[in-house]
Amino acid sequence: MKRNLKIKDLPEFERPREKLEKTNINFLTNSELLSILLGSGIKGTNVKQVSKNILKKFGEKLLDASVKELTEIKGIGIIKAEQIVASLELAKRFIIEDKSKIKILDSNDVFNLCKDLINKKKEHLIVLYLDSLNQLIKKETISIGTVNSSIVHPREIFAPAFLYNATAIVIVHNHPDGDSNPSKEDQEITAKLLKLEDISGIKIIDHIIISKEGYFSLLENYTQNRKIDYFKSGYEQITLSEYYPRFYENELSKEFLNKKYKDSTFDFREIRQTNGIHGMHIYPAVMAYPIADFLIDEYSNEDDVILDPFMGAGTTLVEANIKKRYSFGIDINPLAELITKVKLTPIRKELLKKALDDILTKIKKTEPDIATVKNLHFWFKDNVIAELGKIKKIIWELENSDIRDFYKVVLGEIIRSTSNSRNGFKLHRYSEKDLMRHNPNVKKLFEKKTIENINRLDSMKSVISKKHWYKIVKNISEINDKKVDLIVTSPPYGDSKTTVAYGQFSRFAIEWLELDNVNVDRESLGGKIINHPVYDIYSELLFDIVDNISKQDKKRSNEVFAFFYDLNKCLKEFTRVLKKSGFMCIVVGNRTVKEIQIPTDEIIIELCKKDFFHHKTIVREIPNKRMPRKNSPTNIIGKTVNTMLEEFIIILERR
C-alpha cells in the first residue's frame, strides 16, 4: 500500500502522464490535469496530492486565483504559480474569443466552419460542441479513418460534451469519394447516437456530410427544408431526434455504452489480496484493496467522510484511515464487524506475544469450553473440538478486551480451517476418504496464524491515523442526511443461493465465538422473497430480466427480484446520506441465473439515474476472488455455467 509515494512509484494507472498517453484526455480528472501542469510535488507529498490541495482550497475559483494566493499552498513556488495562472488565463482568452466570434445558426454555418474537410483524403469525424445559445465552445476531431458504428465509439463523442459543459452537438464528417449522400453506416451511427440523447442530456442538432459536391444535412433532409434554423421559436435548440426515423431502434442497446470500458490495469494480477493487514482473516468476495485505495484517493480529500455500507472485512475502512479520512461501516455479519475492529485497533506487539506465550503454556492443563455448535460432531473431529475448546476458554479469560478480540479473530480463522468442511464459501463436508487424511494440528496452526497476524497488525503502526475515527453502525438510519462525502462499496452480487453464502461461510466462527446470533443469509439482500411487481422500484431492464427468468422458474425470478428490491431500498438511503456532488463507487459482478446473465451494473445505473450522474464504468477481470465461478443453472447434475469472470466499477456522482 502506498503512503505518499513518489509518482514514479505509483502503479501506471495512477500516474497522470501515463494515463494521458494511454487514454483520451477527457478521462483525466481535474487534479490529474493540474498534476501534469505542475510536473512534480515536494518531499513527502506527491504532485497528485499537491494538485488536490489546490483544488480543495480554490474549487471553481481557481480560474481567478492570483500568484500570491497560490504560493500560500505548500509545494507551490512562484514559478509554478505563474505557470498555473498563465495557463488558465490563456484558456479563458481562447474560450472568450471563440464564443464572441462563432455562432452556429444553420447548416451553412457548419459547412463554412468545416469546409477544409473537402480536400481531406481520409474520412474525418468532427464534433462541434455548443452552449445553450448555439455558440461554439469547441471544435474537436474525434477520429480519422473509416466512420461507422462499429469503429466510432459513442463515448468518444459524448465524453468531451460533459467536459466542456456543452448542451448540444453537431456531428460532421467528410466523404473523400465526392458523394455527400449518407451511407448505411452514416445512418447507423446517427441512430445509435440519437438513442443515447435522452440518457446523456446532450442534444444532437444535426449530422452533416461534406464532400467536393457540397454538403448534406440530415436535419434538412428529414424536414424537407433547405433553410431550417437551428432554433425553434428563436430560442429553443432544435434536435435531430424529433425528425429522424427510428429504423434501427430495436437493434440498439438500452445501456449508455459510451461510458463503459475495460481497463486491465485494474486486474491487479501481480498483487496478493491477502497482503498485510488485509490477510488477517479470510473472508468471501472482499473488494480488492487497490480498488478501494484508488477510489478513495481519486474521489475524496483528506478529512472527508467515507461510507462502506457493505463493509465485509473492513477493506474500505482500513484504506480510508490510512489516507486520513473518517469512515462509517455497516455490515449485518457480526464476524465482519469483529474483523474490521481488530484491523483498526493498534496493540503493542510485545503484549500480543506475551498473551500468545500464556495461551500456549496453559493449553495442556485447561479444560475445554465447548461452544454450542449445530451438528458439532458432524463438522469437527473430537480431538479438534477439545483443542479449540481449550484455546477458547483461555482467550475468554484474557483481561484486555482488545487483545481478547484479536485472539478471537485468530481463533475464527482456525475454526474454519480445522473443521470437516472443504475449503470454499459454502459448507460441504469432506468425503469419508478425504476425512481420513484430514488431521489438523490445532495448536500449531493457531500459533502460526497468531504470529502472522501480530506482524500484520504491527505493520499498521506507522500508517494508521489515530485522529481519524471509524464508526461501525448497525443501521444506516444512524447516519445523518448529507453527512458522507464518498461511498465506496461492493454489495453482494446476488442472493446467497447463487452467489456467496456469507452466513454459511461465517457460521462456525459466529457459533464458536458466541457472536450475535444473526441469520446472515436470511437478513442479506434478497433473503426475504418479494412477489413482484412492486411499484416503488422502476427499471425496464430489471423487469425484462425477471420476466425472462420467470418463464423458466417463477420461484427463482421472485428471488432475483427480491434481491434488487432490497438493493434499491439501500440505494435510496445512500442518496440520503451522500452530499451533493459526492461520488458513489459501487463494485459489482453480473451473475447468471437460469443461463440468463443479469446486468447488475446497468440495472444499478438505471435505478440511480434520477439522483446520480453516471460518469463511467470500469470493467476488470477477476483474477482471484473467493467466490463461485460456476453454478448450476438448472439443477441438472454435472451441468454448470460460468457465473462471474468480470467486475464492474460504477462511478456515480450525486446530482
Image (cartoon, grey):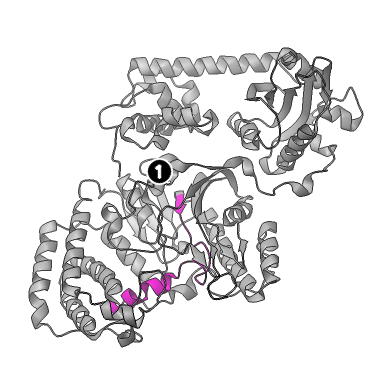
Tell whether 61 sits left or right of 400.
Answer: right
Is residue 504 rendered magenta in the image?
yes
Regarding residue 577, the answer to whether it shows in the image is no
Q: What residue is shown at x 31% (from left), y 85% (from top)? A: 376
How far across and down, in percent of the image, does residue 474 sit? 41, 67
How far across and down, in percent of the image, does residue 188 sit? 76, 37
In this rendering, the answer to whether 573 lies above or below 126 is below
Q: Which residues are magenta?
A: 487-514
Q: Quadrant of the N terminus?
A: top left
In this rendering, the answer to whether 362 lies above or below 56 is below
How far across and down, in percent of the image, does residue 595 sit? 61, 65
Q: Nearer the viewer, residue 502 or 92?
A: 502
Tell whether 248 sits left or right of 350.
Answer: right
Q: In which image quadrant can residue 55 be found?
A: top left
Q: Nearer the viewer, residue 52 or 549?
A: 549
* Farthest right residue in view: 224
* Farthest front residue in view: 433
Q: What residue is shown at x 31% (from left), y 74% (from top)? A: 509
Regarding residue 512, the answer to whether it shows in the image is yes
Q: Nearer the viewer, residue 362 or 263?
A: 263
Q: Nearer the viewer, residue 298 or 363?
A: 363
The residue indicated by pointer 1 is 294
In this rendering, the answer to whether 620 lies above or below 401 is above
Mark 1 lies on a secondary structure that is: helix
Residue kind at label 1, given as amino acid type: Phe
